[in-house]
Amino acid sequence: MEKLSPRRETGQCSFFLKKKNRFCRFRPNKSQLYCAEHSLAMGVELERKRVTCPLDPSHTCYEDCLQKHLKKCNNRRKAEEVYYVEGINSGSDIEEDKVSVNSVSGDELQNVINRINKLYDEYIGCIEEEILTHACLQEELDNETYGTSAMRHRKQQASLVGHMEKLDLLKDNTSFIEMGAGKGQLSHWVQKAMTDKHNLSFLLVDRGSARYKFDSYHKSEEEGPKFERIKIDIEHLDLGKVKSISNNDELVTAIGKHLCGAATDLALRCLIRPVNTDTELPCKRLKTDDTENDRGSYTRCPKGIVIALCCHHRCTWKTYVGKKFMRSNGISSHDFQLLLSISSWATCSWQGWKTEERGKASKTENNQEAHYEDEKVEDYRGSIKLDKREREIIGRKCKRLIDHGRIQYLQDHKMTACLKYYIDGNLTPENVVLLATIEDKV
């Protein structure tokens, strides 16, 4: 079938973006074919001169508005960002050259797979499935106009809030920190679940800028506590220097929905790091496995952590918090990178709810749904033959072993932690949540 060429909408910039296979979505000035940015690129003279932004040469601004632009440019480093500490949560060790299933021999790959199976049986076994819901999302869940794609996100949010309720984390006098907040939908529903609670605060952390943020629902007093949002990579966030956290004695609960790859490890190290460095608190000094990053601060562990996990292939050995577990089982940095590569097998052929809608669903182990368009056997270096189902199972085992290192890290810091299937695996292959509390309630 011949691929249709993208069409330019009326009033849209005429500059075609080859990498995105579409036209620029900015609007040009009156009587112009291109937006201001692409007019400069196309050599079109404009009435007002544009100059390169000194903070980021990838974009331009009007020269007569340069000072105004510098104050709001997304790449500015605001002087008041005292909580920015370069690499405070980055971890230790130097990354080796990248390793993948395509860069090792078949014998080495088979050896690693054998070790994965052995370690999985020894440490993981069966993970409990517990799919919960919460009344705060019932109206959304009953809305028949939503398709499967929209509904699955709401079911995930409902289950995460349900787990928070079961762990007794929806309490008065709590500061909620949403890591990798995006639009802030999870915090929005947590707040809706706590309309009868008092003295709450919400801190949303994300390194990017999201459109249509749910923060707008919480600007008035009628909508409960306002959302504070800070734009920063978690790698550089010193939580103890965020005033809204360090200047109060509220309980801290950390949440996240699909905190991608290394971001989960950065978040865990950030949370186990100093939360209050200027006042004396009745807490113990907790050392990390990265001695060079232990800067002598004190910490109070969060009351609870509820993080839906994903994208293990994007983890790194440097940032990973579970190196102690891996090393104790003979897994080196080289081996770990191979685990990351293999973990992608869990999702690369997953079809899920889209296939079910076409009537091709099939049941698999662990009450998860996995679907395969065919059972093609793949040959690795002439010695390993695996079909899609076998690869997916091995990939999932890698993910859980990576997560177990995180569980051990939290346990070493006096938290009770576990993994659970919190949503139907037919809705998402990333259906595992990490749960941790400072008390024995998990």
Image (spheres, grey):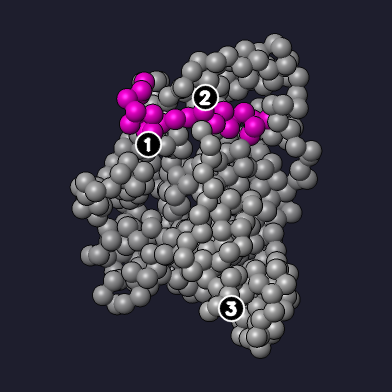
Classed neighbour count for the residue bearing mark 2: other residues with Cα under 10 Å, few (<14), some (14–19), many (≥20): many
Can residue 281 be spotted in the picture? no
Residue 72's disc number: 3
Q: Which residue is mark 1?
A: 427
Task: Please rate how many residues cluster around mark 3, counting C-alpha atoms within 10 Å: few if below 14, some from 14 to 19, many from 20.
Answer: few
Queried whether the magenta region covers residue 172, the answer comes back as no
Viewed as shown, does residue 334 lie left or right of 277? right
Disc 1 to disc 2, C-alpha distance: 16 Å
Residue nearest the observer in this picture, 208 or 288: 208
Q: Residue at x 31, y 77 (%)?
A: 220
In which quarter of the view is residue 356 placed?
A: top left
Q: What x and y, as percent, mark residue 355?
A: 38, 29
Question: Residue 392 got which mark?
Answer: 2
- Of mark 2 and mark 3, the one earlier in the sequence is 3
Image quadrant occupied by the C terminus: top left
Viewer-proximal residue, 426 or 319?
426
The amino acid beneath tag 3 is Lys
The region drawn magenta spans 338-362
Q: In front: mark 2 or mark 3?
A: 3
Query: For the residues marked 1 and 3, what is the alpha-carbon distance in whole angstroms?
Result: 39 Å
Q: Report the Cα–Cα distance between label 2 and label 3.
A: 45 Å
Q: Is residue 366 above or below residue 290?
A: above
Vertically, is 280 above or below 178? below
